Image (spheres, rainbow, N blue to C red):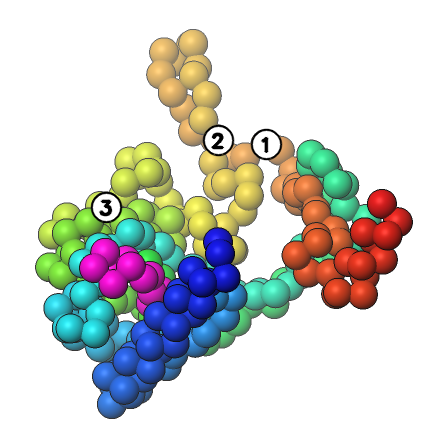
Amino acid sequence: MSSGAQKGMHDRLERLAEDLTRTFKELDCMVERSNGEVTLVVPVEHITDVATRLRDDEPFFFQELIDVCGADYSAYAQSEWQTDSAPNTGFGRGVQPIGRLESMQSNRFAVVYHLLSISKNIRLRLRVFVDTEQPIIATVVSVWQSADWFEREAFDLYGILFDGHPDLRRILTDYGFIGHPFRKDFPLTGQVEMRYDPHQARVVYEPVSIDPRVLVPRVTRDDNRYLSEDNATQDAGDA
């Protein structure tokens, strides 16, 4: 991206942040800026009002809902494995966790919306925290029809309920599935395993027979995007 285009995008983001602060300050919304992106944190009781105004009001015109997803912030920024000795490629298998992760008691679950304004050529993220014990939020299907299946996915994987949704059913897991597999307290091995029993001539469900384990993903170290200018200059000279 050219410097002129970068400056134009920066100016649009600045105007967007100012318009959001001015418009939604009365609703206790909070504007966050990081990594060239703008996020609007919305109280759960105001999501329908805020979504409608973001779609219809002149400074915004966010006509497109690109994505809706859930998030589980329990044990946020904690790690189950020692990344210093993790492999640079592939997965390390059968690794023992370094300790029990501590779960957050408040602000555990959030719903995240990604919006696009075609006419303004700008994007926006909404983040809405829901109650930990009873994660319920109003649906935005009446605002953006594309929210339908996205909200069903968040319900299926995180157990977040969308009040007023026209057809809130599981969408990825099987009939009779117990639990929500993207919650951090859901075991990686699952709750049950299934196999075909030739004697009974049907599929049977049984307790999981393998031991729980942590799979350590590939770790990228010293990414040049995060090196200081001095280190980057030294690395260039060494090369």
Q: Position of residue 231 (x, y in %)?
A: 81, 61
Near mark 2 (Cα within 10 A), the count class, few <14, some 14-19 or many ≥20, is few
Q: What element carries label 2?
A: strand
Residue 64 in the figure: left or right of residue 31: left
Tell me the residue that label 3 is attached to.
Answer: 149
Tell me the residue that label 2 is attached to.
Answer: 193
Placement of 96 over or under 132, stated as above or below: above
Q: Nearer the viewer, residue 35 or 188?
A: 35
User: Which tag, 2 or 3, sits closer to the chain's start?
Assistant: 3
Task: Tell me where the magenta segment starts and ends, as one range.
Answer: 116-126
Residue 126 in the figure: left or right of residue 119: right
Give yes or no for contact between labels 3 and 1 (Cβ–Cβ under 8 Å): no
User: Which tag, 3 or 1, sits closer to the chain's start?
Assistant: 3
Give yes or no for contact between labels 1 and 2 (Cβ–Cβ under 8 Å): yes
Tell me the residue that label 1 is attached to.
Answer: 209
Looking at the rendered structure, the kind of residue marked 1 is Ser
